[in-house]
Image (cartoon, helix red, strand yellow):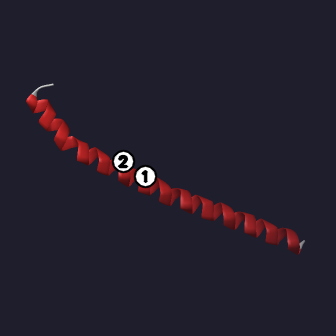
Amino acid sequence: MTEEQATELAALQPKVAQQKQQNRAKSAKYAQRVNAAADRVAELEELAGRGS
């Protein structure tokens, strides 16, 4: 690895790590919304069953 390549790698590593962290945060938020929606559907289905 040349010195130029090592410098480029050192510059890119924090950016990649930051992008990975942002993607993990977005995925976690998405999963929370999906789980909340699934919980709400189950709750509404249960209520619908009681009313019949």
What residue is drawn where x is 51% and y is 57%? Answer: 30
Q: Which residue is labeled 2 in the image?
A: 20
Residue 12 in picture, x, y percent from top left: 21, 42
Q: Quadrant of the N terminus?
A: top left
Please name whichever residue, 9 or 19, is drawn nearer the observer in this view of the structure. 9
What residue is drawn where x is 42% and y is 57%? Answer: 25
Query: Residue 20, relative to residue 35: is it above or below?
Result: above
Tag 2's secondary structure? helix
Q: Which residue is labeled 1 in the image?
A: 24
Query: Residue 9, relative to residue 49: is it above or below?
Result: above
Residue 51 in picture, x, y percent from top left: 87, 74
Q: How dense is the environment of label 2, judged by Cα within 10 Å: few (below 14), some, or many (20 and up)?
A: few
Residue farthest right in this picture: 52
Image-based side of 8 in relation to 39, left or right? left
Please name whichever residue, 42 or 25, is drawn nearer the observer in this view of the structure. 25
Image-based side of 47 in relation to 20, left or right? right
Q: Amino acid at mark 1?
A: Arg
Q: How dense is the environment of label 1, judged by Cα within 10 Å: few (below 14), some, or many (20 and up)?
A: few
Image-based side of 46 in relation to 31, left or right? right
Q: CA distance from mark 2 to mark 1?
A: 6 Å
Q: Quadrant of the C terminus?
A: bottom right
Query: Residue 21, relative to residue 45: is it above or below?
Result: above
CB under 8 Å between callouts 2 and 1? Answer: yes
Q: Amino acid at mark 2?
A: Lys
What is the quadrant of residue 48 in the picture? bottom right
Residue 43 in picture, x, y percent from top left: 74, 68
Residue farthest left in this picture: 3
Tag 1's secondary structure? helix
What residue is drawn where x is 9% and y is 30%? Answer: 3
What residue is drawn where x is 24% and y is 47%? Answer: 14
Residue farthest bottom in this picture: 51
